[in-house]
Amino acid sequence: MSAPDYDLLVIGTGSGARGVAKPCAQAGWRVAVVDRRPYGGTCAQRGCDPKKVMVGIARAVDDAARLQGHGVDGALRLDWSALMAFKQSFVDSVPKGVEAGFRKAGIDTLHGAARFTGPTSMRIDDREVSARHIVLATGAVPAPLPIPGADLMRSSDDFLDLGHLPARVVFVGGGYIAAEFACIAARAGAAVTVVQRGPRMLKGFDPDLVAILMERFRALGIDVRTDSQVTGIEQHKDGYRVTLDHKEEGASTVKADLVVHAAGRVAQVADLDLQAAGVAAEKGRLTLDRTLRSTTNPAVWAVGDAAQKGPPLTPVASHDARVVVANLLEDAGAGPDYRAVPTVAFSLPPIASVGLTAAEARARVKPVRQSCGFAADWFTARHNAERAYGYKVLIEEGTERVLGAHLVGPHADEVINVFALAIRQGLTTSDLKDVMFAYPTTSSDIHSML
């Protein structure tokens, strides 16, 4: 049997892919990466980074609106075309730069759609490639929705590339994408409706803090329809008709110029022909052992959204990559450690969470002290003219270890990292209170949150 073409073939070119490919190349392995889309992955081109650029401009407009009469005179207007051009200035250079980085590391860069043809072989367009190890770092795609007219919806990728913002936008789903993009669209002047199947948006976040955020959404003019199922989408001359079924109020219709899929994402593995490689999957999820290796094909590994072991976040993909590298190069038998992974919805204002929820803390650890409050009268909120400011910190009684933290309000996206450090390192409330935070900053509020 002939030797494989490569020691390692990585499918995808995002943060997880780079985190695996480059260390293995540095160790002397023959490595190749392949992508059917421009190099760089979702986060840098179609996700976190361009989204954050757009949120930043929306927040500037939001800040000016809140501070009217407090030293700001004259309303700001979000210029959509200029915003998209600014966003694109961060995206345009990514593919060329990422591909050049791979080549500099001695990694072969392939282009095309990859499909398994055997346990250790793949066809990339019309080329057959084999490798000792194959790592799937393919990311995620919008989940299929069994809705008549679902093909009329646009994806989050499409929203980030809109040449102009339509007047009426409906988001189907109530998670991160809906929360973030709804705020951007509302601050840009669109009439925004969010349709959420469950009883509230952002179900992964603390319900009390989500309630605070929803007051802010109402002030922004965002119409949130909870307990509502989309039963159909139809196109008409004047736009779209989105039919809803509320579990108590029955059927209703919302008119829209744009309907955006915001109802979750699934691992992008359906088109890889996993069966040809003997790679097991259940309901679209790869079956992996604790080391992120396929349970049925030892040559195949997965990281990030393709693995779906940890939260669907860029730092998780990078962490998974380090785990797989340790197992590939050192046979370490390592598994990922997802303790205290902070997560943020970059809404206006942001909402953030890390560690155990209140329900999890009560179930796992007893007794638990809960320090929580609505802090609209604190300096941080008042000088930002921001009413949406609240916190909930979960503390183990006796040891005083921080178990979980949940925040909404100004700079929650930054302050949550302090709590992530505290939880991961087993710090106590005394440890945090002993830190002299710069004042006046939002982080200095941590003392009062404990």
Image: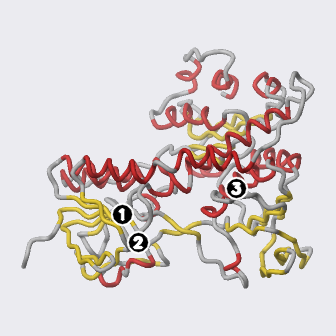
Quadrant of residue 383 in the image? Answer: top right
Q: Is residue 27 left or right of residue 386?
A: left
Q: Label 2, on which residue?
A: 286
Between disc 1 and disc 2, whose residue precedes?
A: 2
Please rate how many residues cluster around mark 3, counting C-alpha atoms within 10 Å: few if below 14, some from 14 to 19, many from 20. Answer: many
**Residue 320, percent from left and from top:** 37, 53
Q: Nearer the viewer, residue 30 or 19?
A: 30
Q: As rendered, which of 139 and 284 lies closer to the eye?
A: 139
Q: Amino acid at mark 2?
A: Leu
| Dot 1 crowding, Cα within 10 Å, few <14, some 14–19, many 20+ | many
Query: Does 34 appear above or below 327?
Result: below
Q: Are marks 1 and 2 in contact (CB under 8 Å)?
A: yes
Q: Is residue 143 above or below residue 16?
A: below
Q: Write the residue at 41% across / 68% down.
A: 36
Instruction: From the image, tell me which residue sits under label 1.
Output: 302
Amino acid on which disc 3 is placed: Leu
- Of the 4 image quadrants, the one containing the N terminus is bottom left
Horizontal and vertical percent position of residue 331: 19, 55
| Residue placed under numbered mark 3 in the picture | 202
- In whole angstroms, how far apart are the C-alphas of marks 1 and 3? 27 Å
